[in-house]
């Protein structure tokens, strides 16, 4: 297994830092290859702008078009090219981050915006009567797997079905489905730790054990059963889920998970 | 009316730039005061780190605790203090941004992470048997209103109830409820433009008309009826919505909207 760990936390001695270190040692100890993108240590540039596209940047910048042109002409910046190469090298991508304001840290969102360029992660494949590009189950990163490892400050009940923050699966849907499944990654059920604001050192061994267990079973874990776009479940080009495919009462994001 | 516009797009001549300019001229033309935070023009620092907290940063950084200590001791950086002052000055906050990868641009997420410090936007108020801090309808920004103005590249059907991307209201919930309603802002229904990847110049006048109409009715528009946390709808401290409050069949994020 070749695993890329994309890690976003400013403090090496944080829980996130420990989980990242544990992932590296656990996977290497099991004979796997591991590379790490430590976004804070790399001083990762978070804001996409004209400087990312070199000579492919238009006078009047168009982010999607210009990023695609830069991708195709080899004028993306070296930091972005290096991350795209790591993604193509990997068969598994682990994202380690704290849930900040109900989403990923800005520095990681900026990694997505810059690395997931047009023609690499979106704007891939043809459109016709039966296909709407290669995405949501197909695309550049098809055949690879992704896993979110997320620390959450608040208690689990706040993220349960009736919890005030909304269900964790729905909060993570725009990431798991919209960012990861979109360019073809299969997404494993997330590893979520709750109540990390009040975690004590005594609780860490159990957490480490659970995390190691997930890491050592990455290859045998069933991905989330997101529906693929171009295989009959959706009307083309409206991309509305066809009537009657979902279990009774299922609505919202949950429509896009089979069974 | 005193409106702060927080604007996130790298190209001044983009649709987002035009909508921001139109908001400024429309509101000023109607006699209102307007201030703009143009995050790209300000070269806004997106990644929260120890440098944000001055002497309040611990040797082993704890983002929440240290940001609160920096807030209370006046050692937050001047760029962050200026944004907090603008928020306190404003009675209305408009966010103008493109939906990138199903969420706000990284530079804007970084504005939230740095400006919404502990003790300012969260970690406010007491916890007891009937209150779980001042949040979700109470807090530092209570009495103010917020509005998202969002451009979306894809067609509206992809963001409809059965659309593959998920319903737009659900995609925006972590922002509207989790980021804006959390510190007390009342959130107006969003102004969303779809299909902006393929927009022609001929369509702009109708868009401008619709946007002006929304801007000129900000004061009379009913906010989204998010449920307030501490007023009887939720169990304390689990923050589970009490049984039977929701309309039949309502689940997920929609539970947290009344009626």
Image: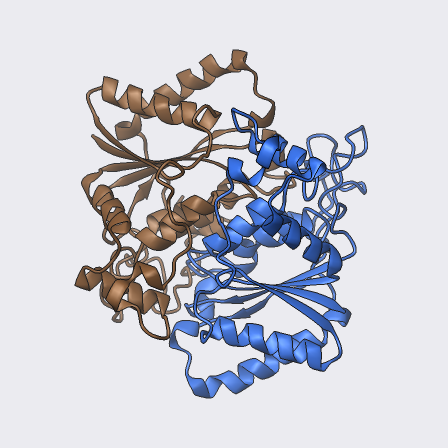
Chain colours: A brown, B blue
Residue A68 percent across, percent down from the top left: 26, 64
Residue A251 appears in the rendering? no
Residue at image point 25% right, 67% down: A55
Give the camera-side residue of A161 and B70.
B70
Residue A57 percent across, percent down from the top left: 30, 68
- Relative to B209, does residue A168 appear above or below in the rendering? above
Residue at image point 79% right, 34% down: B131
Residue B64 appears in the rendering? yes
Residue A234 percent across, percent down from the top left: 36, 61
Relative to B52, B234 lies left or right: right
- Relative to A150, does residue A230 appear above or below in the rendering? below
User: Considering the image in quadrants, where does the C terminus of chain B appear?
Assistant: bottom right
User: Considering the image in quadrants, where does the N terminus of chain B appear?
Assistant: bottom right
Residue at image point 49% right, 63% down: B41
Relative to A79, B115 lies left or right: right
Residue B221 percent across, percent down from the top left: 73, 69
């Amino acid at each position: 297994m070749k695993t890329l760990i994309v890690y976003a936390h400013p403090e090496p001695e944080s829980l996130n830092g420990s989980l990242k270190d544990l992932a590296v040692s656990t996977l290497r100890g099991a004979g796997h290859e591991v590379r790490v993108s430590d976004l804070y240590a790399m001083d990762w540039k978070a804001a996409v702008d004209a400087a990312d596209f070199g000579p492919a940047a238009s006078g009047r910048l168009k982010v999607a078009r210009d990023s695609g042109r830069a991708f195709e002409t080899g004028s993306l910046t070296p930091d972005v090219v290096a991350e795209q190469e790591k993604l193509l090298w990997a068969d598994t991508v682990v994202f380690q981050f704290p849930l900040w304001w109900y989403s990923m840290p800005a520095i990681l969102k900026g990694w997505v915006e810059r690395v997931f360029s047009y023609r690499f992660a979106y704007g891939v494949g043809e459109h016709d009567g039966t296909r709407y590009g290669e995405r949501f189950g197909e695309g550049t990163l098809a055949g690879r797997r992704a896993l979110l490892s997320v620390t959450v400050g608040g208690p689990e009940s706040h993220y349960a079905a009736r919890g005030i923050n909304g269900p964790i699966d729905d909060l993570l849907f725009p990431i798991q489905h919209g960012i990861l499944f979109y360019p073809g990654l299969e997404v494993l059920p997330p590893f979520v730790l709750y109540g990390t604001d009040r975690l004590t050192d005594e609780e860490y061994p159990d957490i480490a054990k659970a995390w190691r267990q997930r890491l050592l079973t990455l290859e045998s874990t069933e991905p989330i059963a997101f529906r693929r776009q171009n295989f009959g479940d959706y009307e083309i080009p409206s991309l509305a889920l066809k009537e009657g495919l979902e279990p009774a009462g299922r609505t919202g994001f949950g429509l896009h998970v089979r069974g």
